[in-house]
Amino acid sequence: MAQVVPLQAVPAQQIRTVLDNQVVDLLIHQLRYGLYINVTVNFVLEIGAVVCQNRNRIIRSRYLNENVGFAGDFIFNDLQGASDPDYTGLGTRYQLLYLSADDLAELGFDA
């Protein structure tokens, strides 16, 4: 089952966590045209400046997962509709979910 990554309703934040034995740093920041995320895995930038959209995978690419060896992906989930996330609703309306390789396989995605 997907794991919720706790967020605060602030325009910029950095989170360090361990997910499936991987050190993951997330930099989330609001710009004029949307919310963006950088994902660093084991101190190597996996993907940067990706726009955050409702229920759209952040990493999305098997190549990127294999390049750094990251297991899993992230999605934002709007609990009150289908809007793309905005910092004002982080942690309440908008959840950031970590999907493990098993979660992705269950959903029919390549890990």
Image: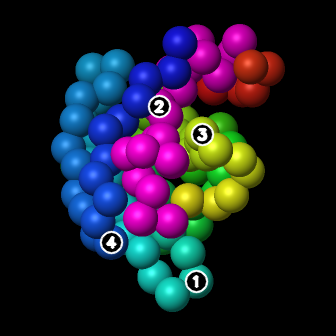
Tell me the amino acid under the disc marked 2: Tyr
Query: In this image, 40 relative to 52: left or right?
Result: left
The residue indicated by pointer 1 is 33
Q: Is residue 61 above or below residue 19?
A: below
The first of marks 1 and 2 along the sequence is: 1
Name the secondary structure under disc 3: loop
Q: Is residue 26 above or below residue 79?
A: below
The residue indicated by pointer 3 is 79
> Which contiguous range is marked in magenta?
86-106
Crowding around mark 2 (Cα neighbors within 10 Å: few <14, some 14 to 19, many 20+) is many
Query: In this image, 105 relative to 85: left or right?
Result: right
The first of marks 1 and 4 along the sequence is: 4
Question: Is residue 50 in sight in this rendering?
Answer: no
Question: Is residue 35 in sight in this rendering?
Answer: yes
Q: Are marks 1 and 2 in contact (CB under 8 Å)?
A: no
Q: Is residue 103 above or below residue 34?
A: above
The residue indicated by pointer 4 is 11
Query: In this image, 23 relative to 11: left or right?
Result: left
Residue 87 screen position, x and y as percent: 42, 65
State how far apart marks 3 and 4 are (Cα): 19 Å
